[in-house]
Amino acid sequence: MRKVILLLSVLAVIAAGWFLYFNKGETRAVVGVHEVDYGDLANTLEFSGEVVCTNMYSVMSETGGTVLNFYVTEGSRVKAGDKLFDLDSTAVEAQLQEAQLKLEALTDAAARTVMAPRAQDTRLDKQQQAAIALALSQTTGYDFDAFNEALGGVGAEAAAAAATAGQRLNELAALQNAGAAADSSNMLSTESQLKLAQLAVNQLKEAVDKMKFTSRIDGTVIAVNINSGEVLAPGLPAMVIADTDSTEIAGYVYEKDVDSLQVGMDVIIMTEGGNYTGKLTKIGNAAVDVGELSMFDTMTKVTIKPDEGFNKMPGAVVDLKIVLSAKDGVLNIPADCLTADGCVYVVDDGDIVRKRRVTTGFMDMFNVEVMSGLTRGERVVTSPDSVKEGQHVSYNRG
């Protein structure tokens, strides 16, 4: 028994010595490692853009006034012609009612002015005929009494008013001319007043209509800037109506990236409320100097049309991503794992580093496809410059 214990002690001493001999002065490096696996790789172009609407307008008043009635709220969908709000038109409607009454009175007066000359003309015609009949009866024996009876007695008035037929005819002609001139003057005066009254009515009707606001387009109320009872100043927007079907996103990309873009490319639209999809619909033809966006390069404007369901309002800023190229389901590692000569350091089961050459393929901004030299589950050092072949390491899985 004592021999067995002695033998075990000797073996332990030898083992310890052996370990110390081969590990004397060695401190294991702590390295990061990455486990080889399959995944999707993609090259993308990322930039920001602003939501714009090609068909929108601000609802403004030319005259201003107090807001009385609201028929919509922010976010309401409207059709062209739908009511939006009214301004207080009480005073203007009172003026309109007064103007309409004046117009009616002038219309009646004009009708009487037109009828009066006709009655007078008829009377003067009869007097002229009677005077002629009187002259004929004095020179030719014409039956004046019968003619006077037929004219209702007007002939007797003519006979008493003129000593001779010629003098009477002259007087009647002068009287008729003077009456016609006076009647014409009265008619012109009445006609002018009538036109002015009609113009006033039309203008007041237009003023009332301008105080009742309806939508010019089909769209959405995206902003309401005033409340019922408040005074709307002339020229200030009370609300904004936008045709959200015309919503687009305008962005700018660097000139060096333009050649990699094509109309029709899929676009990922990223917002705080979630992601949406869209299509690249337009690439600008000319570079734009946008100093506020970039200090180093000119940029080109691009336009994106969001797919159905996008609900961000004009003015919102969103992040955009366009996939330029991609490869799915490939064995890959971080590009930082590669050495300058195209190798990687693999940590074996004994935590010893082994250098190995690999063949690479598709590469995106961060990762590279491994076509040969590695298998799924192997561990590669993420900082190859910090280790050497055969080195013992401790590692943190990256």
Image (cartoon, rainbow, N blue to C red):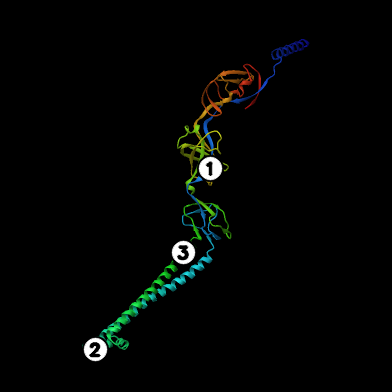
Q: Quadrant of the N terminus?
A: top right
Which residue position is annotated with label 3? 203
Callout 1: few (<14), some (14-19), or many (20+) C-alpha neighbours within 10 Å? Answer: some
In space, the residues marked 2 and 1 are separated at their CA atoms by 105 Å
In this view, the mark in front (2 or 3): 2
- The reply to whether callout 2 and callout 1 are in contact (CB within 8 Å) is no
Q: Earlier in the sequence, mark 1 or mark 3?
A: 1
Where is residue 328? Give x, y as percent: 51, 30
SS class, disc 3: helix
Comparing 357 with 124, the one in front is 124
In this view, 123 is above or below 259? below
Comparing 355 with 243, the one in front is 243
Which residue position is annotated with label 2? 138
Question: Which labelled disc corresponds to residue 314?
Answer: none
Which residue position is annotated with label 1? 50
Where is residue 198? Give x, y as percent: 43, 67
Q: Is residue 185 visible?
A: yes
Q: Earlier in the sequence, mark 2 or mark 1?
A: 1
Q: Residue at x 69, y 13 (%)?
A: 22
